[in-house]
Amino acid sequence: MKTKQELEEIQNEINREVEKLSDPVTGATAKVDGIVDIDQYLSAELRIMWVLKEVNSSGDSEEWNMIDTLRSWSGKSIDHQWRKTFDNILYTTNGILTQTLWEDQQDQDKHPEVTNQLSKISYCNVKKVPGASQTNMSTLERYYNASEKHVLRQINELEPQVIIFGGTYDILEPGLDIMHYKFVMENDLPWYYSQDQIILNARHPQSTSGTRQKYCDNIIKAVINWKNMNG
């Protein structure tokens, strides 16, 4: 495993490149992302990375980033405009790290300390320049294929043990080195694993195809099963 200094250097290098990006049509500037808190990421029970699509902030040229945003929620409830996506990210992450299913977890509104778990993750978007609330997957795929694929470098170099793709697996799959991984289909959730890593092809956290409980528990159970396979 890389040291804190090595991870900092890699993340800073990637994000310096990302900061140069902008949308030539809307003028939106890139919002950097990655490991929220490197110390907590390294000390967590498992190093978790979420891979989502893009920030819903079309035309946004303000100076802010996803790392500071996630860090700002630590110890308090997630801001309401973010909760459609990040409630499921929070409770899935907390469930993995504490091996606790959805119904047995503490509610962040009553126990805001649970949001501290978000400081332990790496959060990465495929498209670093903001888009609209409804992502056009063909457009996203074209962007990715024409880009420097910064997210693929994050996946390969930040050394996550658990990678949760939120509706983004198909775009990234050609660049993933999983030829020798084993495949499992469990509770409608496809996942791939080696001794050192599990990759989950999950739906987007805002998916309405099932309940919040089902979304979170399917991922939590898969990671627990993977851990048990490896002792």
Image (spheres, helix red, strand yellow):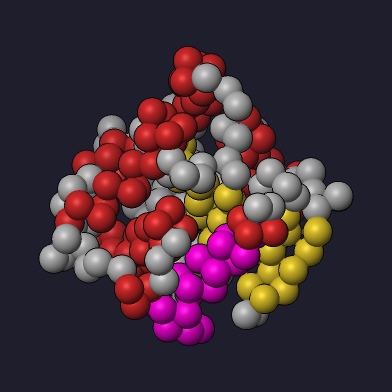
Quarter of the image holding residue 164? bottom right
Quick check: is 216 in the magenta stretch? yes
Given the current orientation, which residue lies at the most extreme bottom position? Answer: 210
The magenta stretch spans which residues?
208-226
Residue at 78%, 64% in the rendered image: 183
- The spot of residue 186 in percent (x, y) is 67, 76
Please name whichever residue, 4 or 29, is drawn nearer the observer in this view of the structure: 4
Q: Is residue 16 left or right of residue 142?
A: left
- The spot of residue 27 in percent (x, y) is 39, 39
Q: What is the quadrant of the N terminus in the image?
A: top right
The answer to whether one can see residue 220 in this image is yes
- The spot of residue 159 in percent (x, y) is 60, 35
Q: Is residue 189 above or below residue 224?
A: below
The answer to whether one can see residue 165 in this image is no
Q: Is residue 150 above or below residue 117?
A: above
Given the current orientation, which residue lies at the most extreme left position? Answer: 110
Residue at 45%, 70% in the rendered image: 216
Given the current orientation, which residue lies at the most extreme front position? Answer: 231
Q: Is residue 81 left or right of residue 180?
A: left
Dominant SS of magenta comes to helix
Please name whichever residue, 3 or 127, is drawn nearer the observer in this view of the structure: 3
Given the current orientation, which residue lies at the most extreme right position? Answer: 180
